[in-house]
Image: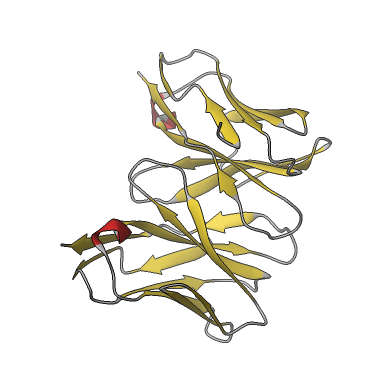
């Protein structure tokens, strides 16, 4: 089983719908991240959490919200999806300050 | 804005040749990391170099860091077709410890 699991792997949704992407990890890491990837733009940080009670906005948090339900679970929500939120979304985890990150396999989201 | 910017955006080489990718960043850092991504897959960590280190090796990978120029390079020696992937640098700042990625270099190694 993967250490960092994202669900769903693929999702097509309509404009205006609420959608939640979920991430769970079995690595025991304290830090979790959500990124989006668009062609040619690399990965941009949406939100990050250093522990259950510490959640921070990243570079592009507008239109997104997150919930850290437990140390092992970090969910990303799009309250009202719009087409320019079509992207590949990655969850990542790390342990401690400035250490290597471990990525999930990604969720491909299409908003039509 | 993104902290790291890679150069070149795309690189095509013959198998057996060396591949060099560069990364520039804007502010002081705690460390810099390189990741690899096969098409559409999750990123995999390759190597981490701390701000007080100048060079680091891991197998066929060599990473250098020049904090005065705010730049790093990744050298892959004796490249193989299986090295074909996108490569990203990511920086960690002392103040926030969040991981910020650059836009990546697409490497194609021709058999």
Q: Residue furthest right?
A: A53
The residue depicted at 57 percent of the width and 87 percent of the height is B68
Image position of A56 (left or right of B2): right
| Residue B2 visible | no
x, y percent for residue A22: 60, 25
For the residue pair A73 and B59, the one nearer the viewer reads as B59
Give the position of the N terminus of chain A as an image quadrant: top right
Q: Is residue A53 above or below residue A58?
A: above
Q: Position of residue B22 (x, y in %)?
A: 40, 74
Above or below, A52 relative to B109: above
Task: Name the one closer to the observer, B41 or A74.
Answer: B41
Report whether A8 appears left or right of B53: left
Q: Quadrant of the C terminus of chain A?
A: top left
Determine whether A101 is above or below B91 in the image: above
Q: Quadrant of residue A21?
A: top right
> In this view of the protein, which residue sits in the foreground, A24 or B65?
A24
Residue at image position (43%, 56%) is B36
Residue shown at 48%/14% (left/top)?
A16
Q: Do we see residue B29 in this rendering?
A: yes
Decide which of A39, A96 is in the foreground and name it. A96
Q: Position of residue A70 (x, y in %)?
A: 78, 28
Q: Report which quarter residue A103 is drawn in.
A: top right
Query: What kind of colouring is applied to the model shown?
Result: secondary structure
Residue A89 sits above or below residue A93 on the image: above
Q: Position of residue B25 (x, y in %)?
A: 52, 71
Q: How many marks?
A: 0
């Amino acid at each position: 089983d993967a250490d960092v699991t994202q669900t769903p792997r693929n999702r097509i949704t309509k404009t205006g719908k609420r959608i939640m992407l979920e991430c769970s990890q079995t690595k025991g890491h304290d830090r979790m991240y959500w990124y989006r990837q668009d062609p040619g733009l690399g990965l941009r940080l949406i939100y990050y959490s250093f522990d259950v009670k510490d959640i921070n906005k990243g570079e592009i948090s507008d239109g997104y919200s997150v919930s850290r339900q437990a140390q092992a679970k970090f969910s990303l929500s799009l309250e009202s999806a719009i087409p320019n939120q079509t992207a590949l979304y990655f969850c990542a985890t790390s342990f401690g300050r400035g250490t290597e990150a471990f990525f999930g396999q990604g969720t491909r989201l299409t908003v039509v | 804005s993104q902290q790291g910017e890679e150069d070149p955006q795309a690189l095509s080489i013959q198998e057996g040749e060396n591949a060099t990718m560069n990364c520039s960043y804007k502010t002081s850092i705690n460390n810099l990391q390189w990741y690899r991504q096969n098409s559409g897959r999750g990123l995999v960590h390759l190597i981490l170099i701390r701000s007080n280190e100048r060079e680091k090796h891991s197998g066929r990978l060599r990473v250098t860091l020049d904090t005065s120029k705010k730049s790093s390079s990744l050298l892959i020696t004796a490249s193989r077709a299986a090295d074909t992937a996108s490569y990203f640098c990511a920086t960690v700042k002392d103040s926030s410890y969040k991981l910020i990625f650059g836009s990546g270099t697409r490497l194609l190694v021709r058999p």
